């Protein structure tokens, strides 16, 4: 195992032999943002028969000629009703929107265009314009693939599945992600503070990201700087969680006991340092029976950057959405960016679309402990090791942070 690995090599090690989880069946109301595990194939046509698109009268075009015309209304059919006979010459059937069109009719005249007296309707014009009929299968036919496996389901998708008369969905199971902040110096939000305490913020940010990415976060109490206690707490989650994420406690100090605890539980380290900034202390280990550990740095902004770089792809692989997680793009640098050092850097920044393409500006505050710049960011700007100064107009590789900001947005830059 190499002590210090590149981001690309670390990602390859992390995703090696990782496959989507099993599937589960959920109701339609539970389906939004879930990932389809099977294709949705229509068991019926929609609509199943020709239906009226307007309130009006079903007639035969041949009965209208060039007008004037006179027809006898022989029945009235509401939505959900039916007319069992064949429409004959000189006849009309009163229809309401959504009612099935009688056999023999090929036109619905809207009610505003007729005069009615008793059971007789009259008009002066011939047939022109729309027939006002929704043909059988105009939305979809039986056997059509409505949605493909791997799709992230939207609200409209759920309506489409419901229209196909399917009450349930087979979706990828959500990975359960246990999240442990570590350190005796940490306290939970709302606690009484002293000058030597730090409020645990990273856990809540990572948990929110896990939810946005399609996983189920399991927030754990803060881990103390005691290896025996850490081993017990981690061991308790090995059986019911797919990924164990630790925040902090992963450097080389006397109080950094997380990696030794993972080793004691039978985990083999795949990498323990990554040549990235921020995030050098990131590490990954796995047990022989498939338990996965990801160690994130303790500084909150650094932890969130590394969650995007490592945890998001892992969650995405577990739900079959890896391409979505690694959607690196090219963007135009809007303001000069200083030369980079020996580690690959991922800068928090802002982006906006311009007539010339996506334009990005790096925040001038890149300290790994600062959250206010990250809260304003919607993109990570990737800078190679020893990269020269990026000047305005250069092209840079970027990773959008839609889930980080609660949905796509394009702030001004």
Image: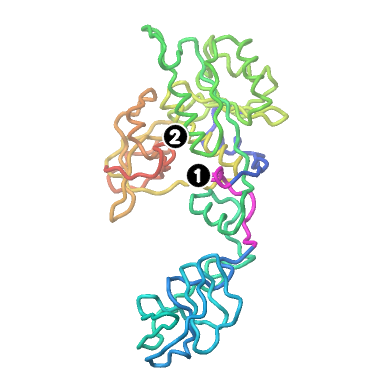
Quadrant of image for the N terminus: top right
Quadrant of image for the C terminus: top left
Q: Is residue 20 rendered magenta in the image?
A: no
Query: Residue tagged by mark 1?
Result: 326
Q: Is residue 31 left or right of residue 345?
A: right
Q: Position of residue 282 (x, y in %)?
A: 52, 26
At a point 32% along the width and 41% down the height, the residue shown is: 390
Closer to the observer: label 2 or label 1?
A: 1
At a point 50% along the width and 73% down the height, the residue shown is: 76
Which of the two discs, 2 and 1, labels the residue nearer the N terminus? 1
The answer to whether 165 is drawn above or below residue 239 in the figure is below
Q: Is residue 29 rendered magenta in the image?
A: yes
Q: Nearer the viewer, residue 148 or 20?
A: 148
At a point 59% along the width and 56% down the height, the residue shown is: 148
Mark 2 and mark 1: Cα distance apart in space: 17 Å
The answer to whether 256 is drawn above or below residue 160 in the figure is above
């Amino acid at each position: 195992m190499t002590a210090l690995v590149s981001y690309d090599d670390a990602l390859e090690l992390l995703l090696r032999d990782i496959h989507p989880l099993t599937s589960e069946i959920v109701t339609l109301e539970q389906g939004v943002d879930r990932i389809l595990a099977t294709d949705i194939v229509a068991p019926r046509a929609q609509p199943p028969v020709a239906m009226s698109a307007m309130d009006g009268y079903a007639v035969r075009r041949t009965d209208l000629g060039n007008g004037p015309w006179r027809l006898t209304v022989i029945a009235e059919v509401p939505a959900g009703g039916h007319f069992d006979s064949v429409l004959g010459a000189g006849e009309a059937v009163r229809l309401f929107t959504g009612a099935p069109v009688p056999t023999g009719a090929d036109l619905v005249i809207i009610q505003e265009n007729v005069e009615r007296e008793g059971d007789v309707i009259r008009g002066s014009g011939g047939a022109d314009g729309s027939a006002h009929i929704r043909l059988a299968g105009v939305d979809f036919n039986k056997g059509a693939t409505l949605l493909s496996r791997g799709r992230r389901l939207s609200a409209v998708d759920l309506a489409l599945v419901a229209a196909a008369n399917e009450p349930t969905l087979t979706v990828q199971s959500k990975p359960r992600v246990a999240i442990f902040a570590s350190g005796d110096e940490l306290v939970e939000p709302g606690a009484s503070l002293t000058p030597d305490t730090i409020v645990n913020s990273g856990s809540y940010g990572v948990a929110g990201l896990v939810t946005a990415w399609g996983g189920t976060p399991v927030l754990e109490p803060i881990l103390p700087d005691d290896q025996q206690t850490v081993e017990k707490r981690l061991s308790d989650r090995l059986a019911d969680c797919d990924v164990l994420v630790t925040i902090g406690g992963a450097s080389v100090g006397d109080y950094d006991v997380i990696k030794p605890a993972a080793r004691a539980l039978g985990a083999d380290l795949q990498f323990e340092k990554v040549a990235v900034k921020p995030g050098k202390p990131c590490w990954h280990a796995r047990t022989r029976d498939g338990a996965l550990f990801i160690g994130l740095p303790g500084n909150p902004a650094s932890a969130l950057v590394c969650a995007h770089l490592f945890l998001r792809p892992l969650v995405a692989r577990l739900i079959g959405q890896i391409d979505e997680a690694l959607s690196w793009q090219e963007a135009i640098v809007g303001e000069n960016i200083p030369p980079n050092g020996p580690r690959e850097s991922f800068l928090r920044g802002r982006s906006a679309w311009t007539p010339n393409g996506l334009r990005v500006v790096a925040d001038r505050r890149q300290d790994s402990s600062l959250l206010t710049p990250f809260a304003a960011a919607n993109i990570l700007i990737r800078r190679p090791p020893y990269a020269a100064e990026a000047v305005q107009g250069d092209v840079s590789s970027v990773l959008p942070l839609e889930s980080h900001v609660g949905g796509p947005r394009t702030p001004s830059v």
